Amino acid sequence: MRVLEQAAIDAALTLPALIDAIDSLLRADVVVPVRHHHPIAREDGEAMHLIMPAWHAGAGGYLGVKIVNVFPGNADRGLPSVLGAYVLMNGDTGAPMALIDGTRLTLWRTAATSALAARYLARPDAATHLVVGAGALAPFFLRAHRAVRPVTRSIIWNKTRANAEKLAASLAAEGLVVEVAEDLESAVREADIVSTITLSREPLVHGAWLKPGAHLDLVGAFTPAMRETDDDCVLRSRLFVDTRGGVLKEGGDLVQPIAAGLVSADQVEADLPELARGAVINPRQPGDITLYKSTGGAMFDLATAMQIARATGLVA
């Protein structure tokens, strides 16, 4: 069994190829059980332990499982909030093939999956992309959306401005110019795509700020108690999700307004596999506001692990 760490993953993956690989697997016959979701009480904030399996149905293919720990208090320790490992196995024998850095895999997978959703849902001419949050995911999201839309202006806002400035400086050294927003409302009003990747429990983005044609890419609120957008965002938008089972159970941005009776689960038009299979009947109109909520899914992890395995020569 090979061990594939961060450097090997970064050398193996490109965002365009990974986005296409995830898109392709969404059309395959893959079994994805509901993930195991276990809260861990801690003095520095409730942590989460997640177990996420997926496998190809029938003969051949692959079996994989990601073990993830989300510890919000890690920020004070200088560690990522999300840490984990991924085991890729032979789908016929169950033999382990690779142990993959699950933290790095998750960063690549999450950004690529959101970019795939934007490829289906965002306006074709979307040129201004705002990222709310300056954590480890932020640089991946800034790059990923440029792979699917003609983004010429990237903006980042963070509650602690210094963290956003530090990230912008590091990206500038790589040739990617990113503006640091002083005021979140003004930045949202200008954005064609708004990606939220925070651990907020209170709404940050307000529906009244969204311009016609905007696309919301909501990633951070992964429990029913968390929320990054207000009710107006939901009421003004066409609703889409990465997986119905995950978001309608765990994604606070939709769970809370559904529980309040403001919208119903039936108003979710499609999940990402349905988008990949052409299930959306009504095409986007120029003024439509689209809301895509994700909580993560094992199918997307499996696609990323398979792409890593192919690119590193582990499988043909």
Image: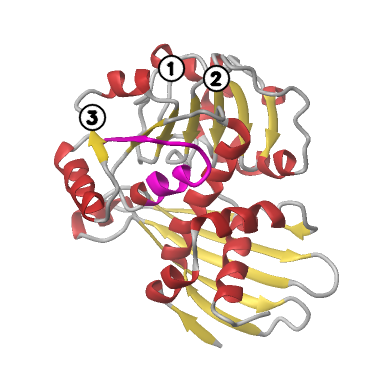
Looking at the image, the residue that sits furthest to the top is 208
**Residue contact between numbered discs 1 and 2, judged by CB atoms under 8 Å:** yes
Q: Residues within 10 Å of mark 2 (few under 14, many from 20)?
A: many
Residue 295 shows up from this direction: no
| Amino acid type, callout 2 | Ile
Q: Residues within 10 Å of mark 1 (few under 14, many from 20)?
A: many
Q: Please give the residue where the numbered disc 3 appears in the rendered image.
A: 181
Q: Please give the residue where the numbered disc 1 appears in the rendered image.
A: 210
Looking at the image, the residue that sits furthest to the left is 162
Quadrant including the N terminus:
bottom right
| Horizontal relation, residue 249 to residue 231: left or right | right
Residue in view at x 49 percent, y 66 percent? 13
Residue in view at x 71 percent, y 52 percent? 26
The magenta stretch spans which residues? 140-157
Q: Please give the residue where the numbered disc 2 appears in the rendered image.
A: 289
Q: How many marks?
A: 3
**Residue 315: % across, % down:** 65, 80
**Residue 190: % across, % down:** 36, 20
Quarter of the image where one finds residue 17: bottom right
Q: Which of 185 and 63 is in front in this view?
A: 185
| Horizontal relation, residue 180 to residue 15: left or right | left
Quadrant including the C terminus:
bottom right
